[in-house]
Image: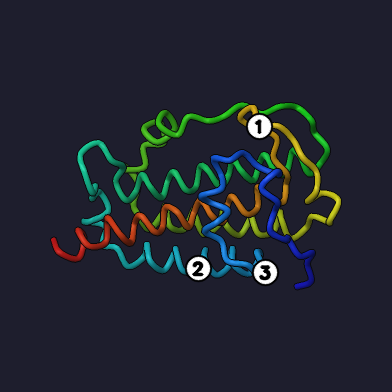
Amino acid sequence: MSHVTISRPDASEYAPYYVKYVGKVPDGDLLATLERDGRDTVTLLRGIPEAKALTRYAPGKWSVKEVVGHICDAERIFSYRALRFARGDATPLKTFDQDAYVPAGRFDARPLAELATELERIRGATVALFSGLDAAALERKGVASEKEVSVRALAWIVAGHARHHVEILKERYLPLIAGA
């Protein structure tokens, strides 16, 4: 599949808050990273027993299922922002409140396998979206959460945000799941 290279964005292309996500993504072919990370994450999730998917690493923290639901929601929202801005839509987009979205998503009521499949499909759609953009579209910018952001930066934020949460799953949840 031939595609435009999505180079690492300059720090001026996104809000300082997102430095922590963009910095988690290795240099190289971002689309290949998104595809590989998507496969690896789904494999990881499919290895977690359903009986352990409600695990929380501390009181008040999200369950495994809620983390996965949050990754799905955020990836959809970041990709939607990218689509709007790539198409030249200059309408400022509001922030989303993850702490309101997660309970409303009722992720704990769904099977983890279903959430993993949903994430797999969302990632496929994300890769398809960014694969179809040309260099001009990737350079376009818009305002989201009251901060200017480029389409290119949103692609990197998608990858880094998911990596951030997968790291938390591995570091804080999996040891509890394995030890229980």
Label pair 3/2, CB-CB below 8 angstroms: no
- Marks 3 and 2, Cα distance to the nearest angstrom? 16 Å
Please identify, in this view, whether the residue under mark 1 or under mark 3 is nearer the observer. 1
Q: Please indicate whether residue 82 sits to the left or right of residue 169 in the image.
A: right
Residue drawn at (31%, 42%) of the image:
62
Q: Secondary structure at mark 3?
A: loop
**How many residues crowd mark 3 within 10 Å: few (<14), some (14–19), many (20+)?**
some
Which residue is label 1 attached to? 147
- Marks 2 and 1, Cα distance to the nearest angstrom? 31 Å
Residue drawn at (33%, 61%) of the image:
170
Q: Which quarter of the image is occupied by the C terminus?
A: bottom left
Q: Secondary structure at mark 2?
A: helix
Percent across and percent down for residue 12 are 70, 43
Please identify, in this view, whether the residue under mark 2 or under mark 1 is nearer the observer. 1
Percent across and percent down for residue 26 are 57, 66
Which residue is label 2 attached to? 39
Would you place residue 88 above or below residue 48 in this image?
A: above
Q: Please indicate whether residue 157 sits to the left or right of residue 43 in the image.
A: right
Question: Farthest residue in the bottom direction?
Answer: 1
Please identify, in this view, whether the residue under mark 3 or under mark 2 is nearer the observer. 3
Would you place residue 153 above or below residue 177 in this image?
A: above
